[in-house]
Image: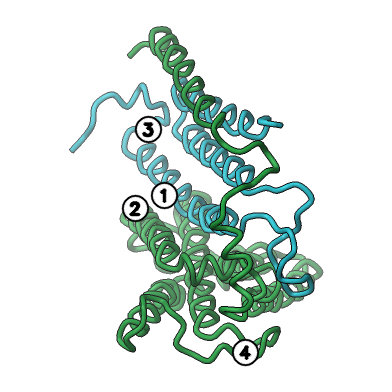
Amino acid sequence: MSYLPYALAIWIFVVALYGIVTSRNLVHIAVCVSVAQSATYVLLLAVGFRNRATAPIFSDIPTHSRVVDPVVQALTLTDVVVSVAVGALLLAFAVKSFERTGSLDPTMIAELHG
Amino acid sequence: MRDRPRTILFGISAVGLVLLLGWGTAGLPSFGHYAGPYGDLIAQLSKPQRHVANAVTATVFDYRGFDTLGEELIMVAAAAATAMLLRDVRESSTHGPVDAVRSEAVTMIGALAAIATFVLALQVIAHGFLTPGGGFQGGVVLSAAVALVFATMEYGAFHRVTREGIVEPLEGGGAFAFAGFGLLSLALGLAFLQNFLPHGTFGRLTSGGSLSLVNWSSGIAVAGACVVLYGEYLQEAMTARHPRRGSR
């Protein structure tokens, strides 16, 4: 019985939330969002893991081998690539915000310009 | 809101969130004792049903292909939005600065590395349903080959590749092809993204049926999106580094 990987996922997620809440820099917030997202990878892969099992690739192992769950791996795989693009979009917002207001501090950008 | 009350408020809600998440994960099967039937079914069926060795690729492009289409559209939309945001101020700077690497040794090794990376990327995409790999991983490797051109040769060469209407059509075309193969399945009277080609011999490069076409289209879309992102950020950096030439 072990719940340590689940606890790790929760810890990563809460630490990232703490970073977002207390952040004074938009780039730092984008990094924190990506840390929060990596908590989901840990959780997904931990859920699909199975003791003494191998990767679900049947090139050279029999079809009824003991393998880990391929579904959560597929979800993680697409999520990793998508998170790169979304991270780039967040950083582009930070660049634009700096150009408009001259600051990366979210508390200084108090008023929204429509 | 001021910092101190905000941190206190966060602390209170974080404790609640941790308790809620802990309560939720306590109901999960213990680590290493995966119990679900869904993953087991796909793992056992992907080889006999689809002639695909890599059950993860079979999940991404076949069993959960519709879900992957959504993910891919998010990626394409995010890359397009990044390009739109970063482009609006430097509309005029179509002729970017030339930032060449002066060492011939670096250029030589870089050219070899770029070619090797390119071939590796094609291999990772092409064998995605037989060995670990696939369109998503191979697409990122493919974009790294283009990034190597910038890192070891000159910005101008990278700029020509990324800015003259080659990469964006590839990116959009890959995503369009992904959706198009799904619609073709529908037009043939099958379910969305259902296989419409012969499965082929297991273990061959031609096996997998239409899954391999979807695999290639997603690889091209991912590579295109990554190269668009590199190009936008590099141009941003170059415009900042060479302000006079960049703004001309």
| Residue on which the image places disc 1 | A89
| Residue on which the image places disc 4 | B206
> Residue visible at 52% across and 55% down?
A75
What type is the residue that disc 4 sits on?
Thr
Disc 2 from disc 4: Cα separation: 41 Å
> Residue visible at 60% across and 63% down?
B99
Under circle 1, the secondary element is: helix
Disc 1 and disc 4 on one polypeptide chain: no
**Quarter of the image where the N terminus of chain B is located:** top left
Under circle 2, the secondary element is: helix
> Residue visible at 53% across and 50% down?
B241
Residue B179 placement: quadrant = bottom left
Q: Colour of chain A?
A: cyan
Toward the viewer: B235 or B115? B115
Disc 3 and disc 4 on one polypeptide chain: no
> Residue visible at 35% across and 23% down?
A108
Residue A106 falls left or right of residue A27? left
